[in-house]
Image (cartoon, helix red, strand yellow):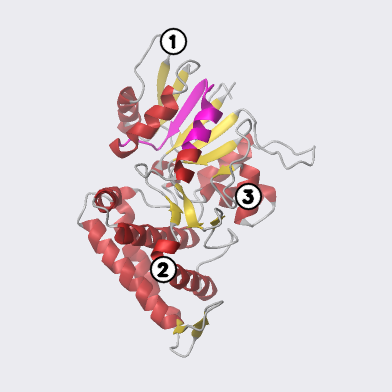
């Protein structure tokens, strides 16, 4: 039986902020960066590869803090970061749009190093992982697909405890993440994680995607911050040449469109859909309709997991995505301590 999970921000809420809490968490990061232990000497210099440029670590940190402050102020003036991003996009303020996405990407990386992993990913992976007796690294059920609107690497971070490998790209390969390092668009006929909004990283001119960090087990500290600041300076020197691999639903980007197409192919025969922490926002509606209506002929049951009345609200909003028909059963799951495992699994 083909089972698909559809994840929204609520699926990572124990580790990362939902939309309304993003300004609060950026403020918290700014507070951390103000700690004297994160002040660098102006004599500490970044040497940029293939460049004669020399810039102090402290200056780069000040630039990062300034950008965080400015964009956080702009986000607070709008109903959400999505609203601000859409405004920049439709008014063709491309440089500002790229800048917002890059600052937000680096914020997300820092936030995941500061916060512990959402424990629900660990328990979910423990439940679905199988013993690897074949030696081929295939630990996950072939009949399951994960579609995520999140940019984070919570899955990669949690799965590293099962793969026994801390490298982000190695775990993305085992999880069959779309997209990931090397623009991974591999098989759709096995377990796969489809990130509809892309992932935190940089889309290189070669067509590959590079993560800002190489390993998932790094801790936030001086060493980590030094790496992040060096990457930040390198990328923001020429924003137009270093587009982030984080996308919004309305972008007509070739990689984003290919992820959507592959997600549709991989989930077209879904029989059970489990929706976790996802409210079907208007901005994403066109893509949601494409993917879920593509399941229509085989879809038999949809579970909506969210706390209390939210689960009922998700069920109601689902009506704007797929009209209810005979034989399609919708069920609310209001217990959220663990990711729901359907009895059909």
Q: Nearer the viewer, mark 3 or mark 2?
A: 2
Q: Helix, strand or loop at disc 2?
A: loop
Q: Nearer the viewer, residue 249 or 218?
A: 249
Categorize mark 1 by other alpha carbons within 10 Å: few (<14), some (14-19), many (20+): few
Q: Which residue is mark 3?
A: 171
Find out whether residue 14 is within the magenta segment.
no
Find out whether residue 264 is within the magenta segment.
yes
- Residue 132 location (% of width, % of height): 75, 39
Q: Which residue is mark 1?
A: 327
Residue under the point 36% across and 59% down: 98
Residue extending farthest to the right is: 134
Visible in this render: residue 35?
Answer: no
Q: Which residues are magenta?
A: 259-281
Quadrant where the C terminus is found in the figure: top right
Q: Which residue is mark 2?
A: 238
Q: Helix, strand or loop at disc 1?
A: loop
Quadrant where the N terminus is found in the figure: top right
> Is 153 on the left or on the right of 317, as rendered?
right
- Residue 69 location (% of width, % of height): 29, 68
> Is 66 on the left or on the right of 302, as rendered?
left
> Is 294 on the left or on the right of 133, as rendered?
left
Question: Of callouts 1 and 3, which one flags the residue occurring earlier in the amino acid sequence?
Answer: 3
Number of marks drawn: 3
Categorize mark 2 by other alpha carbons within 10 Å: few (<14), some (14-19), many (20+): few
């Amino acid at each position: 039986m083909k089972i698909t999970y559809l994840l929204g921000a609520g699926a990572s809420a124990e580790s990362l902020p939902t939309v309304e809490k993003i300004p609060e968490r950026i403020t918290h990061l700014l507070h951390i960066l103000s700690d004297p232990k994160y002040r660098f000497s102006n004599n500490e210099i970044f040497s940029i590869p293939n460049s004669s440029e020399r810039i102090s670590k402290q200056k780069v940190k000040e630039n990062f803090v300034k950008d965080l402050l400015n964009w956080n102020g702009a986000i607070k003036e709008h109903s959400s970061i999505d609203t601000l991003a859409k405004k920049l996009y439709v008014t063709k303020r491309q440089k500002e749009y790229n800048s917002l996405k890059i600052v937000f990407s680096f914020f997300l990386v820092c936030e995941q190093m500061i916060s512990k992993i959402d424990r629900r990913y660990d328990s979910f992976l423990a439940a679905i992982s199988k013993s690897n007796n074949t030696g081929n690294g295939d630990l996950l059920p072939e009949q399951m697909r994960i579609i995520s609107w999140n940019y984070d690497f919570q899955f990669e971070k949690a799965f590293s405890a099962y793969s026994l490998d801390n490298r982000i790209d190695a775990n993305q390969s085992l999880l069959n993440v779309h997209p990931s390092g090397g623009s991974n668009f591999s098989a759709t006929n096995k377990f796969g994680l489809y990130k509809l909004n892309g992932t935190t990283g940089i889309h290189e001119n070669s067509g590959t995607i590079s993560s800002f960090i190489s390993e998932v087990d790094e801790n936030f500290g001086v060493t980590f911050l030094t790496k992040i600041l060096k990457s930040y300076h390198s990328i923001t020197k020429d924003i137009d040449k270093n587009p982030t691999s984080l996308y919004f639903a309305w972008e007509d980007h070739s990689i984003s469109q290919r992820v959507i197409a592959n997600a549709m192919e991989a989930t077209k025969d879904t029989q059970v859909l489990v929706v976790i922490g996802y409210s079907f926002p208007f901005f994403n509606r066109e893509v949601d309709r494409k993917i879920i209506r593509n399941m229509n002929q085989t879809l038999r049951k949809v579970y909506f997991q969210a706390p209390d009345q939210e689960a009922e609200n998700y069920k109601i909003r689902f009506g704007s995505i797929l009209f209810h028909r005979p034989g399609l059963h919708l069920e609310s799951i209001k217990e959220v301590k663990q990711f729901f495992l359907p009895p059909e699994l």
